[in-house]
Image: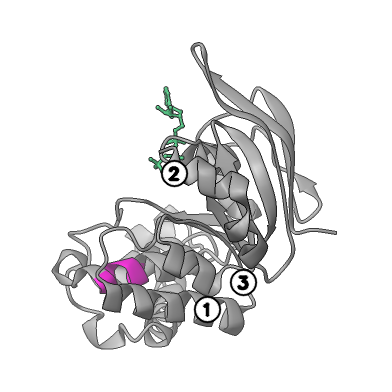
Amino acid sequence: MALLEVKNLGISFGGLRAVDDFHMEIEQGQLYGLIGPNGAGKTTVFNLLTGVYEPTDGYIMLDGENITGKKTIEINKHGIARTFQNIRLFSELTVLDNVKVGLHNHYKYSTLTGILRLPRYYKVEKEMNERAMELLKVFDLDKEADYKASNLPYGKQRKLEIARALATDPKLLLLDEPAAGMNPNETLELMKTIRFVRDKFHMTILLIEHDMKLVSGICEKLTVLNFGQVLTEGPTAEVLKDPKVITAYLGE
Ligand SMILES: Nc1ncnc2c1ncn2[C@@H]1O[C@H](COP(=O)(O)OP(=O)(O)OP(=O)(O)O)[C@@H](O)[C@H]1O
């Protein structure tokens, strides 16, 4: 059974059929790319998978559970986490606190425990700090734990966003144009980070990306979207050679 199974997914905005008859199967541990020309519907697919939009057709199964039409917060609890095209960190919070926000799904104390600073509050806080620091260490961000997130260089902010998404303990990680705005060195570093996350956490990753070096360097399989529909899908090397795909990009 695939970890993610999507069939016949669709949504319209007014008269525009932004995504139509979309389908995709991703196996556990796969590094999968969703590509296509500008405006093809890639981010809309992410918004459908994460409950930002409710599909008018089709279904989404995650690890055997039907999550179609569920709210974003429920979908996150079911195991989908995401990063955004434009980095969305809590820029005024510290690096450590950004990761702790992600951990809140799993560590709980009542409001009263928090207000009265009961012993359980300190126990949970200590555990969260330790877990957050472990994650920061994995991403080589532990030395900057007390920095304000906005003071990190761009490449590190991207890493922090991925660390925060992983803190929610997802089954599937969605990365929306992770290399956007990066220089070639930062992109190379990011490719290593994404591969590392997959290997270390045995994470399943679906990413949207325009940078073909990154796509061909790390994605095992691709789905190509064009005008809201699947143009083709398959192993990366084959898809990138497909004349249909080349034409779709040249027609941009
Ligand atoms: N909330 C919305 N309301 C109306 N139209 C929308 C909305 N969201 C997306 N669209 C339209 O749906 C189409 C697909 O947009 P989408 O952002 O998903 O494309 P994309 O493949 O992610 O593009 P890019 O690579 O440029 O980010 C576009 O024509 C866009 O204008």
Quarter occupied by residue 172? bottom right
For the image, the number of numbered tags is: 3
Point 28% across, 79% down: residue: 185
Looking at the rendered structure, the secondary structure element under dot 3 is loop
Can see residue 193?
yes
Alpha carbon separation for disc pair 3 and 1? 9 Å
Between disc 3 and disc 1, the foreground one is 1
Q: Amino acid at mark 2?
A: Leu
Does the magenta portion include 82? Answer: no
Name the residue beneath numbered marker 2.
250
Rate crowding at label 1 as few (under 14), some (14 to 19) or many (20 or more) other CA atoms within 10 Å. Answer: some
Of marks 1 and 2, which one's residue comes earlier in the chain?
Answer: 1
Q: Could you say which disc has been placed on residue 219 in the image?
A: none
Rate crowding at label 2 as few (under 14), some (14 to 19) or many (20 or more) other CA atoms within 10 Å. Answer: few
Name the residue beneath numbered marker 3.
203
Side of 42 where 63 appears, left or right: right
Name the residue beneath numbered marker 1.
195
Report the magenta residues as a range. Answer: 155-160
Point 61% across, 44% down: residue: 244
Q: Main secondary structure of the magenta part?
A: helix
